[in-house]
Protein backbone atom coordinates (compact mmCIF):
# COMPACT_ATOMS: atom_id res chain seq x y z
CA UNK A 1 0.00 0.00 0.00
CA UNK A 2 1.50 3.30 -1.07
CA UNK A 3 1.73 5.79 1.81
CA UNK A 4 4.02 8.44 0.31
CA UNK A 5 6.91 7.79 2.72
CA UNK A 6 4.79 8.49 5.83
CA UNK A 7 5.95 6.83 9.04
CA UNK A 8 4.14 3.51 9.23
CA UNK A 9 2.09 3.12 12.40
CA UNK A 10 0.13 -0.10 12.92
CA UNK A 11 -2.74 -0.37 15.37
CA UNK A 12 -4.91 -3.31 16.37
CA UNK A 13 -8.63 -3.26 17.01
CA UNK A 14 -8.04 -4.86 20.41
CA UNK A 15 -5.84 -1.84 21.33
CA UNK A 16 -8.49 0.65 20.20
CA UNK A 17 -11.66 -0.84 21.70
CA UNK A 18 -12.42 0.61 25.12
CA UNK A 19 -10.20 3.64 24.58
CA UNK A 20 -11.79 7.06 25.17
CA UNK A 21 -11.90 9.90 22.69
CA UNK A 22 -10.83 13.04 24.53
CA UNK A 23 -12.47 16.32 23.51
CA UNK A 24 -10.82 19.75 23.32
CA UNK A 25 -11.63 20.47 26.98
CA UNK A 26 -9.90 17.29 28.10
CA UNK A 27 -13.11 15.45 28.92
CA UNK A 28 -14.02 12.02 27.60
CA UNK A 29 -16.61 12.05 24.82
CA UNK A 30 -17.19 8.32 25.28
CA UNK A 31 -15.33 5.07 24.89
CA UNK A 32 -14.87 3.37 21.53
CA UNK A 33 -17.16 0.34 21.38
CA UNK A 34 -16.67 -0.42 17.69
CA UNK A 35 -15.31 1.07 14.46
CA UNK A 36 -17.18 1.75 11.23
CA UNK A 37 -15.43 1.25 7.90
CA UNK A 38 -16.45 1.98 4.34
CA UNK A 39 -15.88 -1.12 2.23
CA UNK A 40 -13.57 0.31 -0.41
CA UNK A 41 -10.91 -1.45 -2.44
CA UNK A 42 -8.21 -2.35 -1.75
CA UNK A 43 -8.38 -1.44 1.96
CA UNK A 44 -11.45 -0.20 3.92
CA UNK A 45 -11.13 3.17 5.66
CA UNK A 46 -12.30 3.80 9.22
CA UNK A 47 -14.88 6.60 9.07
CA UNK A 48 -16.62 6.56 12.46
CA UNK A 49 -16.39 5.23 15.97
CA UNK A 50 -19.34 3.84 17.91
CA UNK A 51 -19.13 5.69 21.23
CA UNK A 52 -20.60 4.59 24.54
CA UNK A 53 -23.03 6.99 26.20
CA UNK A 54 -21.54 9.62 28.49
CA UNK A 55 -23.11 11.68 31.23
CA UNK A 56 -26.16 13.42 29.82
CA UNK A 57 -26.47 11.03 26.88
CA UNK A 58 -28.89 8.13 26.74
CA UNK A 59 -27.82 6.29 23.60
CA UNK A 60 -24.73 5.27 21.72
CA UNK A 61 -23.66 7.50 18.82
CA UNK A 62 -21.49 7.35 15.74
CA UNK A 63 -18.72 9.93 15.90
CA UNK A 64 -16.54 10.87 12.95
CA UNK A 65 -13.28 9.11 13.69
CA UNK A 66 -10.51 11.64 14.48
CA UNK A 67 -7.55 11.77 12.14
CA UNK A 68 -4.40 10.06 13.33
CA UNK A 69 -1.72 12.68 13.67
CA UNK A 70 1.81 11.88 12.53
CA UNK A 71 3.57 9.79 15.14
CA UNK A 72 0.39 9.32 17.20
CA UNK A 73 0.59 5.64 17.99
CA UNK A 74 -0.46 6.13 21.61
CA UNK A 75 -3.97 6.22 22.96
CA UNK A 76 -6.34 7.79 24.00
CA UNK A 77 -7.41 9.57 20.85
CA UNK A 78 -7.65 13.34 21.08
CA UNK A 79 -9.63 15.87 19.05
CA UNK A 80 -9.02 19.60 18.82
CA UNK A 81 -12.56 20.66 17.93
CA UNK A 82 -16.06 19.18 17.93
CA UNK A 83 -19.20 20.15 16.04
CA UNK A 84 -22.68 18.64 15.79
CA UNK A 85 -22.01 17.38 12.24
CA UNK A 86 -19.41 15.00 13.67
CA UNK A 87 -22.17 12.95 15.32
CA UNK A 88 -24.87 10.82 13.73
CA UNK A 89 -27.33 8.14 14.73
CA UNK A 90 -25.84 4.62 14.96
CA UNK A 91 -27.28 3.37 11.67
CA UNK A 92 -25.09 1.88 8.97
CA UNK A 93 -25.16 3.26 5.44
CA UNK A 94 -24.70 1.26 2.27
CA UNK A 95 -21.26 -0.33 2.06
CA UNK A 96 -20.49 0.30 5.75
CA UNK A 97 -19.49 -2.30 8.31
CA UNK A 98 -19.15 -2.43 12.09
CA UNK A 99 -15.89 -4.30 12.52
CA UNK A 100 -16.24 -5.83 15.98
CA UNK A 101 -19.84 -6.78 15.34
CA UNK A 102 -19.27 -8.29 11.86
CA UNK A 103 -15.75 -9.74 12.10
CA UNK A 104 -14.29 -10.25 15.55
CA UNK A 105 -14.62 -13.91 16.63
CA UNK A 106 -16.48 -14.60 13.39
CA UNK A 107 -15.56 -16.90 10.52
CA UNK A 108 -14.15 -15.51 7.29
CA UNK A 109 -13.08 -17.09 4.02
CA UNK A 110 -9.39 -16.78 3.17
CA UNK A 111 -9.84 -16.62 -0.61
CA UNK A 112 -6.08 -16.98 -1.18
CA UNK A 113 -5.56 -20.05 1.00
CA UNK A 114 -9.10 -21.32 0.24
CA UNK A 115 -10.09 -22.08 3.82
CA UNK A 116 -12.39 -20.92 6.59
CA UNK A 117 -10.73 -19.22 9.58
CA UNK A 118 -11.70 -17.42 12.79
CA UNK A 119 -10.89 -13.73 13.27
CA UNK A 120 -8.94 -13.00 16.46
CA UNK A 121 -7.98 -9.38 15.80
CA UNK A 122 -7.77 -6.74 13.07
CA UNK A 123 -4.73 -4.68 12.09
CA UNK A 124 -4.84 -1.11 10.77
CA UNK A 125 -2.24 1.06 9.06
CA UNK A 126 -2.22 4.83 9.42
CA UNK A 127 -1.94 6.61 6.07
CA UNK A 128 -2.74 10.25 5.32
CA UNK A 129 -4.10 10.65 8.88
CA UNK A 130 -6.63 7.86 8.30
CA UNK A 131 -6.90 4.30 9.54
CA UNK A 132 -6.96 1.62 6.83
CA UNK A 133 -7.92 -1.98 7.60
CA UNK A 134 -5.06 -3.98 6.09
CA UNK A 135 -4.88 -7.37 7.83
CA UNK A 136 -7.02 -9.91 9.61
CA UNK A 137 -5.23 -11.67 12.48
CA UNK A 138 -6.17 -15.36 12.65
CA UNK A 139 -3.33 -16.53 14.89
CA UNK A 140 -2.82 -17.40 18.54
CA UNK A 141 -0.89 -14.16 19.05
CA UNK A 142 -4.08 -12.24 18.30
CA UNK A 143 -5.91 -14.05 21.09
CA UNK A 144 -3.07 -13.35 23.54
CA UNK A 145 -3.04 -9.68 22.55
CA UNK A 146 -6.77 -9.36 23.26
CA UNK A 147 -6.41 -11.05 26.65
CA UNK A 148 -3.47 -8.82 27.61
CA UNK A 149 -1.06 -11.78 27.80
CA UNK A 150 0.97 -11.14 24.62
CA UNK A 151 4.10 -9.84 26.34
CA UNK A 152 3.99 -12.48 29.09
CA UNK A 153 3.62 -15.31 26.57
CA UNK A 154 6.43 -13.87 24.42
CA UNK A 155 8.74 -13.71 27.45
CA UNK A 156 7.85 -17.24 28.52
CA UNK A 157 8.26 -18.85 25.08
CA UNK A 158 11.42 -16.98 24.17
CA UNK A 159 13.08 -17.57 27.54
CA UNK A 160 12.17 -21.25 27.86
CA UNK A 161 12.16 -22.47 24.25
CA UNK A 162 13.89 -19.66 22.31
CA UNK A 163 10.69 -19.48 20.27
CA UNK A 164 8.88 -16.39 19.03
CA UNK A 165 5.14 -16.69 18.55
CA UNK A 166 4.52 -15.84 14.87
CA UNK A 167 1.94 -13.47 13.50
CA UNK A 168 -0.70 -15.05 11.29
CA UNK A 169 -2.09 -12.26 9.15
CA UNK A 170 -4.26 -12.42 6.05
CA UNK A 171 -4.33 -9.40 3.79
CA UNK A 172 -7.77 -7.84 3.61
CA UNK A 173 -7.56 -8.27 -0.17
CA UNK A 174 -8.07 -12.00 0.38
CA UNK A 175 -10.74 -11.83 3.08
CA UNK A 176 -14.44 -12.48 2.58
CA UNK A 177 -16.67 -11.99 5.64
CA UNK A 178 -19.53 -14.47 5.90
CA UNK A 179 -21.24 -13.41 9.12
CA UNK A 180 -24.04 -11.62 7.28
CA UNK A 181 -25.83 -12.63 4.05
CA UNK A 182 -25.81 -8.93 3.08
CA UNK A 183 -22.00 -8.92 2.96
CA UNK A 184 -22.00 -11.87 0.58
CA UNK A 185 -24.10 -10.02 -1.97
CA UNK A 186 -21.59 -7.22 -2.44
CA UNK A 187 -19.68 -7.13 -5.72
CA UNK A 188 -16.45 -7.37 -3.69
CA UNK A 189 -17.58 -10.73 -2.34
CA UNK A 190 -18.64 -12.08 -5.71
CA UNK A 191 -15.33 -11.12 -7.31
CA UNK A 192 -13.25 -12.67 -4.52
CA UNK A 193 -15.22 -15.89 -4.23
CA UNK A 194 -15.33 -16.43 -7.99
CA UNK A 195 -11.51 -16.44 -8.08
CA UNK A 196 -11.40 -19.58 -5.91
CA UNK A 197 -11.21 -22.91 -7.74
CA UNK A 198 -14.65 -24.60 -7.65
CA UNK A 199 -13.23 -27.66 -5.87
CA UNK A 200 -11.77 -25.42 -3.12
CA UNK A 201 -14.96 -23.40 -2.93
CA UNK A 202 -16.90 -26.64 -2.48
CA UNK A 203 -14.61 -27.56 0.44
CA UNK A 204 -15.22 -24.15 2.00
CA UNK A 205 -18.99 -24.46 1.66
CA UNK A 206 -18.92 -27.92 3.23
CA UNK A 207 -17.00 -26.53 6.24
CA UNK A 208 -19.69 -23.96 7.03
CA UNK A 209 -22.86 -24.42 9.02
CA UNK A 210 -26.15 -24.79 7.15
CA UNK A 211 -27.13 -21.10 7.30
CA UNK A 212 -23.72 -19.79 6.21
CA UNK A 213 -23.43 -22.51 3.56
CA UNK A 214 -26.66 -21.41 1.90
CA UNK A 215 -25.76 -17.71 2.12
CA UNK A 216 -22.32 -18.21 0.52
CA UNK A 217 -23.72 -20.41 -2.24
CA UNK A 218 -26.54 -18.04 -3.12
CA UNK A 219 -24.11 -15.12 -3.33
CA UNK A 220 -22.22 -16.76 -6.22
CA UNK A 221 -22.86 -15.93 -9.85
CA UNK A 222 -24.73 -18.63 -11.77
CA UNK A 223 -21.69 -20.08 -13.56
CA UNK A 224 -19.53 -20.25 -10.41
CA UNK A 225 -22.43 -21.75 -8.45
CA UNK A 226 -22.90 -24.48 -11.06
CA UNK A 227 -19.18 -25.35 -11.14
CA UNK A 228 -19.05 -25.42 -7.35
CA UNK A 229 -22.19 -27.54 -7.06
CA UNK A 230 -20.64 -30.19 -9.31
CA UNK A 231 -17.74 -30.49 -6.85
CA UNK A 232 -19.90 -30.63 -3.72
CA UNK A 233 -21.01 -33.66 -1.73
CA UNK A 234 -24.37 -34.94 -3.11
CA UNK A 235 -26.14 -34.56 0.24
CA UNK A 236 -25.04 -30.94 0.48
CA UNK A 237 -26.04 -30.39 -3.16
CA UNK A 238 -29.56 -31.41 -2.23
CA UNK A 239 -29.72 -29.14 0.83
CA UNK A 240 -28.45 -26.14 -1.16
CA UNK A 241 -30.95 -26.58 -3.97
CA UNK A 242 -33.86 -27.38 -1.63
CA UNK A 243 -33.29 -23.94 -0.03
CA UNK A 244 -33.72 -22.14 -3.37
CA UNK A 245 -36.81 -21.31 -5.37
CA UNK A 246 -37.32 -23.35 -8.54
CA UNK A 247 -36.52 -20.50 -10.96
CA UNK A 248 -33.13 -19.66 -9.39
CA UNK A 249 -32.26 -23.34 -8.99
CA UNK A 250 -33.05 -24.04 -12.64
CA UNK A 251 -30.69 -21.26 -13.77
CA UNK A 252 -27.83 -22.95 -11.92
CA UNK A 253 -28.69 -26.51 -12.93
CA UNK A 254 -28.86 -25.49 -16.60
CA UNK A 255 -25.17 -24.53 -16.35
CA UNK A 256 -24.22 -27.99 -15.05
CA UNK A 257 -23.31 -30.95 -17.22
CA UNK A 258 -26.32 -33.07 -18.17
CA UNK A 259 -25.16 -36.10 -16.21
CA UNK A 260 -24.47 -34.03 -13.07
CA UNK A 261 -27.82 -32.25 -13.44
CA UNK A 262 -29.65 -35.57 -13.78
CA UNK A 263 -27.88 -37.03 -10.73
CA UNK A 264 -28.83 -34.00 -8.64
CA UNK A 265 -32.45 -33.90 -9.74
CA UNK A 266 -32.70 -37.62 -9.08
CA UNK A 267 -31.69 -37.00 -5.45
CA UNK A 268 -34.22 -34.20 -4.88
CA UNK A 269 -37.75 -34.67 -3.67
CA UNK A 270 -40.16 -35.43 -6.50
CA UNK A 271 -42.04 -32.16 -5.99
CA UNK A 272 -38.84 -30.06 -6.03
CA UNK A 273 -37.42 -31.83 -9.09
CA UNK A 274 -40.65 -31.41 -11.05
CA UNK A 275 -40.78 -27.72 -10.17
CA UNK A 276 -37.22 -27.16 -11.38
CA UNK A 277 -37.76 -29.15 -14.61
CA UNK A 278 -40.75 -26.92 -15.44
CA UNK A 279 -38.52 -23.85 -15.14
CA UNK A 280 -35.69 -25.27 -17.26
CA UNK A 281 -35.32 -24.80 -21.01
CA UNK A 282 -37.42 -27.45 -22.69
CA UNK A 283 -34.60 -29.13 -24.66
CA UNK A 284 -32.40 -29.59 -21.60
CA UNK A 285 -35.34 -30.66 -19.45
CA UNK A 286 -36.19 -33.39 -21.95
CA UNK A 287 -32.56 -34.59 -22.03
CA UNK A 288 -32.44 -34.73 -18.24
CA UNK A 289 -35.74 -36.61 -18.05
CA UNK A 290 -34.33 -39.19 -20.47
CA UNK A 291 -31.26 -39.71 -18.27
CA UNK A 292 -33.45 -40.05 -15.18
CA UNK A 293 -35.19 -43.10 -16.67
CA UNK A 294 -31.98 -45.16 -16.33
CA UNK A 295 -30.56 -46.68 -13.11
CA UNK A 296 -27.71 -44.57 -11.75
CA UNK A 297 -25.12 -47.37 -11.72
CA UNK A 298 -25.78 -48.56 -15.28
CA UNK A 299 -24.44 -47.02 -18.48
CA UNK A 300 -27.67 -45.14 -19.18
CA UNK A 301 -27.51 -43.46 -15.76
CA UNK A 302 -23.83 -42.61 -16.05
CA UNK A 303 -23.86 -41.11 -19.53
CA UNK A 304 -24.31 -37.56 -20.76
CA UNK A 305 -26.20 -36.72 -23.92
CA UNK A 306 -24.24 -33.50 -24.48
CA UNK A 307 -21.67 -34.69 -27.04
CA UNK A 308 -20.92 -34.10 -30.72
CA UNK A 309 -21.64 -36.51 -33.59
CA UNK A 310 -21.52 -36.06 -37.37
CA UNK A 311 -22.19 -37.88 -40.62
CA UNK A 312 -19.22 -39.48 -42.42
CA UNK A 313 -19.35 -36.94 -45.28
CA UNK A 314 -18.70 -33.97 -42.95
CA UNK A 315 -15.44 -32.13 -43.64
CA UNK A 316 -12.90 -31.16 -41.02
CA UNK A 317 -13.55 -27.45 -41.64
CA UNK A 318 -17.29 -27.91 -41.03
CA UNK A 319 -16.74 -29.96 -37.89
CA UNK A 320 -14.27 -27.48 -36.36
CA UNK A 321 -16.63 -24.61 -37.16
CA UNK A 322 -19.47 -26.37 -35.33
CA UNK A 323 -17.20 -27.21 -32.42
CA UNK A 324 -16.35 -23.51 -32.01
CA UNK A 325 -20.04 -22.60 -31.79
CA UNK A 326 -21.27 -25.50 -29.66
CA UNK A 327 -18.33 -26.53 -27.46
CA UNK A 328 -19.52 -24.38 -24.54
CA UNK A 329 -22.72 -26.44 -24.30
CA UNK A 330 -20.98 -29.81 -24.58
CA UNK A 331 -19.81 -31.92 -21.64
CA UNK A 332 -17.13 -33.57 -23.76
CA UNK A 333 -15.40 -32.75 -27.09
CA UNK A 334 -12.15 -34.75 -27.01
CA UNK A 335 -13.72 -37.43 -29.23
CA UNK A 336 -16.01 -36.72 -32.19
CA UNK A 337 -18.35 -39.58 -33.05
CA UNK A 338 -19.32 -40.55 -36.60
CA UNK A 339 -22.85 -41.87 -37.20
CA UNK A 340 -25.06 -42.76 -40.15
CA UNK A 341 -28.46 -41.25 -41.00
CA UNK A 342 -30.08 -43.45 -38.33
CA UNK A 343 -27.49 -42.35 -35.72
CA UNK A 344 -25.89 -45.79 -35.68
CA UNK A 345 -22.32 -45.53 -34.40
CA UNK A 346 -19.73 -45.98 -37.15
CA UNK A 347 -16.49 -44.64 -35.70
CA UNK A 348 -14.75 -41.85 -33.85
CA UNK A 349 -12.12 -39.17 -34.45
CA UNK A 350 -10.02 -37.52 -31.75
CA UNK A 351 -9.77 -33.76 -31.51
CA UNK A 352 -6.03 -34.06 -32.08
CA UNK A 353 -6.60 -35.84 -35.41
CA UNK A 354 -9.01 -33.12 -36.48
CA UNK A 355 -6.52 -30.36 -35.74
CA UNK A 356 -3.71 -31.90 -37.80
CA UNK A 357 -5.92 -32.90 -40.78
CA UNK A 358 -6.52 -30.76 -43.85
CA UNK A 359 -9.70 -28.74 -43.93
CA UNK A 360 -11.29 -30.66 -46.80
CA UNK A 361 -10.63 -34.10 -45.32
CA UNK A 362 -13.73 -36.21 -44.68
CA UNK A 363 -14.55 -37.84 -41.35
CA UNK A 364 -15.07 -41.13 -43.20
CA UNK A 365 -11.35 -41.07 -44.12
CA UNK A 366 -10.18 -40.10 -40.64
CA UNK A 367 -12.40 -42.14 -38.35
CA UNK A 368 -11.35 -45.23 -36.44
CA UNK A 369 -14.11 -47.83 -36.78
CA UNK A 370 -12.77 -49.94 -33.90
CA UNK A 371 -14.97 -48.17 -31.37
CA UNK A 372 -15.32 -49.52 -27.85
CA UNK A 373 -18.93 -49.00 -26.78
CA UNK A 374 -21.35 -50.24 -24.13
CA UNK A 375 -25.10 -50.83 -24.02
CA UNK A 376 -27.54 -48.83 -21.93
CA UNK A 377 -27.84 -51.52 -19.25
CA UNK A 378 -24.10 -52.23 -18.91
CA UNK A 379 -23.00 -52.50 -15.26
CA UNK A 380 -20.55 -49.99 -13.77
CA UNK A 381 -17.95 -52.67 -13.01
CA UNK A 382 -17.87 -53.83 -16.63
CA UNK A 383 -17.56 -50.24 -17.78
CA UNK A 384 -14.69 -49.65 -15.36
CA UNK A 385 -12.87 -52.68 -16.80
CA UNK A 386 -13.18 -51.23 -20.31
CA UNK A 387 -11.79 -47.85 -19.25
CA UNK A 388 -8.85 -49.61 -17.61
CA UNK A 389 -8.18 -51.95 -20.53
CA UNK A 390 -8.33 -49.38 -23.35
CA UNK A 391 -7.17 -46.23 -21.56
CA UNK A 392 -10.06 -44.15 -22.90
CA UNK A 393 -11.30 -40.76 -21.68
CA UNK A 394 -14.89 -41.56 -22.64
CA UNK A 395 -16.97 -44.49 -23.87
CA UNK A 396 -20.08 -44.13 -26.09
CA UNK A 397 -23.37 -45.77 -25.05
CA UNK A 398 -25.58 -47.43 -27.69
CA UNK A 399 -29.01 -49.04 -27.68
CA UNK A 400 -29.95 -52.45 -29.07
CA UNK A 401 -29.77 -51.11 -32.63
CA UNK A 402 -26.26 -49.62 -32.15
CA UNK A 403 -27.69 -46.08 -32.15
CA UNK A 404 -25.59 -43.76 -30.01
CA UNK A 405 -27.50 -42.45 -26.98
CA UNK A 406 -24.80 -40.82 -24.90
CA UNK A 407 -21.21 -40.83 -23.68
CA UNK A 408 -19.79 -41.89 -20.32
CA UNK A 409 -16.98 -39.65 -19.08
CA UNK A 410 -14.28 -41.23 -16.95
CA UNK A 411 -14.89 -38.58 -14.27
CA UNK A 412 -18.54 -39.58 -13.96
CA UNK A 413 -17.67 -43.24 -13.62
CA UNK A 414 -15.04 -42.46 -11.00
CA UNK A 415 -17.62 -40.71 -8.83
CA UNK A 416 -19.62 -43.96 -8.72
CA UNK A 417 -16.96 -46.67 -8.42
CA UNK A 418 -14.47 -44.69 -6.31
CA UNK A 419 -16.23 -41.69 -4.73
CA UNK A 420 -13.23 -40.96 -2.48
CA UNK A 421 -11.23 -40.21 -5.65
CA UNK A 422 -13.98 -38.35 -7.48
CA UNK A 423 -16.63 -36.18 -5.90
CA UNK A 424 -16.74 -36.55 -2.13
Image (cartoon, rainbow, N blue to C red):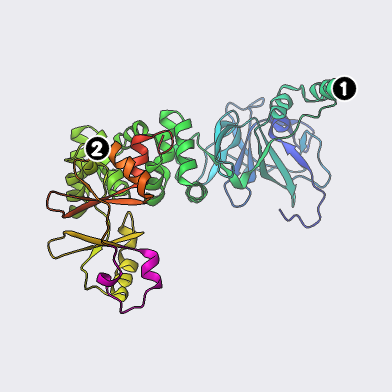
Residue 346 position by quadrant = bottom left
Front in this rendered view, residue 62 or 217? 217
Q: Is residue 6 above or below residue 13?
A: below
Q: Is 273 colored magenta in this rendering?
A: no
Q: Is 362 colored magenta in this rendering?
A: yes
Under circle 1, the secondary element is: helix
Residue at the disc numbered 1: 159
Q: Earlier in the sequence, mark 2 or mark 1?
A: 1
Q: Residue placed at 81% from the left, 53% from the top? A: 6
Which x, y percent locates residue 326? 30, 64
Per the rendered image, the range of residues in magenta is: 349-368
Residue at the disc numbered 2: 379
Q: From this viewpoint, is residue 170 visible?
A: yes
Q: Residue placed at 83% from the left, 20% from the top? A: 156
Q: Residue placed at 20% from the left, 44% from the top? A: 291
The local crowd at label 2, few if under 14, some if 14 to 19, many if 20 or more residues have their Cα within 10 Å, is some
Front in this rendered view, residue 288 or 132? 288
Front in this rendered view, residue 212 or 264? 264
Which x, y percent locates residue 151? 82, 25
Amino acid sequence: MAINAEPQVFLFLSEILGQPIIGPEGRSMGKIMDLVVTLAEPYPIVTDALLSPTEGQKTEMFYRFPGIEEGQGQRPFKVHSVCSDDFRAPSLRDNELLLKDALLDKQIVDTHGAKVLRVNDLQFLTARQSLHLVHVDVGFRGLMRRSGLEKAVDTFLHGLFDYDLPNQFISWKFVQPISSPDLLRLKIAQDRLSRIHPADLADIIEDLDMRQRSAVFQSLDVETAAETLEETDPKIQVSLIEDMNAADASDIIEEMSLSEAADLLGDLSKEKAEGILKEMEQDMAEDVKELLTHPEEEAGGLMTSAFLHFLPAATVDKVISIIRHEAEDMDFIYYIYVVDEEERLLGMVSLRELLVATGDALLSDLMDDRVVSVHLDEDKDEIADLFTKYGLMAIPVVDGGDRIKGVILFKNLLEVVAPHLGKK
